[in-house]
């Protein structure tokens, strides 16, 4: 917490950017940004894009993959070495240049989402 490993998170040209140009290999160096207070009501509006090549050593499923984790456990409650917080994620996938690729998926590390209702069930 409070470490910006290899300058991964940057504000550049008035944009929040995630960059891996200082990495030789990825080595499971997943990063998460937390806000210092909890929100119970919010609206998000943003643009996103992927650029550059995949960092060597990254998982094949992680190519042009990012997202926003909502309803996440706190940064303080993450255990050392825990790759992903228990959360509901809006997952963004970039094109691979070969065919259409869906985006705007829901990813649910450590949770179960029931469709057709509004109940969320954390697994921790």
Image (cartoon, helix red, strand yellow):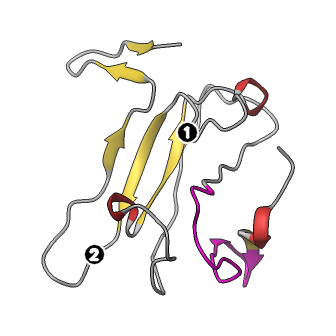
Q: Provide residue 113's location: percent of width, then percent of height.
A: 32, 22
Q: Quadrant of residue 29?
A: bottom right
Which sits in the foreground, 45 or 93?
93
Is 49 rendered above or below residue 123?
A: below
For the point 72% across and 29% down, the residue is 38
Which sits in the foreground, 110 or 44?
110
Position of the N terminus, as image quadrant, is: top right
Q: Provide residue 85's location: percent of width, then percent of height.
A: 58, 33
Residue matched to label 1: 84
Is 16 rendered above or below residue 70?
A: below
Q: Which mark is residue 95?
A: 2
In the figure, is residue 60 to the left or right of 33?
Answer: left
Query: Decide: marks 1, 2 in contact (CB < 8 A)?
Result: no
In the figure, is residue 70 to the left or right of 79?
Answer: left
Residue range corresponding to the magenta coloring? 11-29
Report how far apart the C-alphas of labels 1 and 2 lie in the structure: 23 Å
Closer mark to the observer between disc 1 and disc 2: 1
Which sits in the foreground, 61 or 27?
27
For the point 66% across and 77% down, the residue is 23
Is 69 rendered above or below residue 79?
A: below
Is 35 rendered above or below residue 22?
A: above
Q: Residue furthest left?
A: 99
Q: Residue furthest right?
A: 2
Q: Callout 2: helix, strand or loop? A: loop
Task: Give neighbour class at mark 2: few <14, some 14-19, many 20+ (Cα, 10 Å).
Answer: some
Check residue 27 for magenta coloring: yes
Q: Provide residue 15's location: percent of width, then percent of height.
A: 67, 74
Which sits in the foreground, 43 or 101?
101
Q: Callout 1: helix, strand or loop? A: loop
Instruction: Name which of mark 1 and mark 2 comes first in the sequence.
Output: 1
In the figure, is residue 73 to the left or right of 68?
Answer: right
């Amino acid at each position: 917490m409070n470490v910006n490993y290899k300058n991964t998170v940057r504000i550049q040209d008035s944009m929040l950017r995630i960059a891996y140009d200082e990495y030789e290999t990825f080595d499971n160096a997943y990063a998460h940004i937390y806000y210092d207070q909890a929100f119970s009501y919010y609206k998000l509006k943003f643009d996103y894009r992927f650029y550059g090549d995949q960092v060597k050593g990254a998982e094949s499923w992680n190519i042009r993959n990012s997202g926003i984790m909502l309803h996440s456990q706190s940064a303080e409650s993450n255990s050392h070495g825990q790759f992903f917080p228990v959360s509901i994620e809006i997952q963004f996938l970039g094109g691979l240049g070969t065919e259409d690729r869906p985006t705007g998926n829901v990813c649910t590390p450590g949770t179960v989402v029931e469709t057709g209702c509004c109940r969320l069930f954390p697994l921790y």
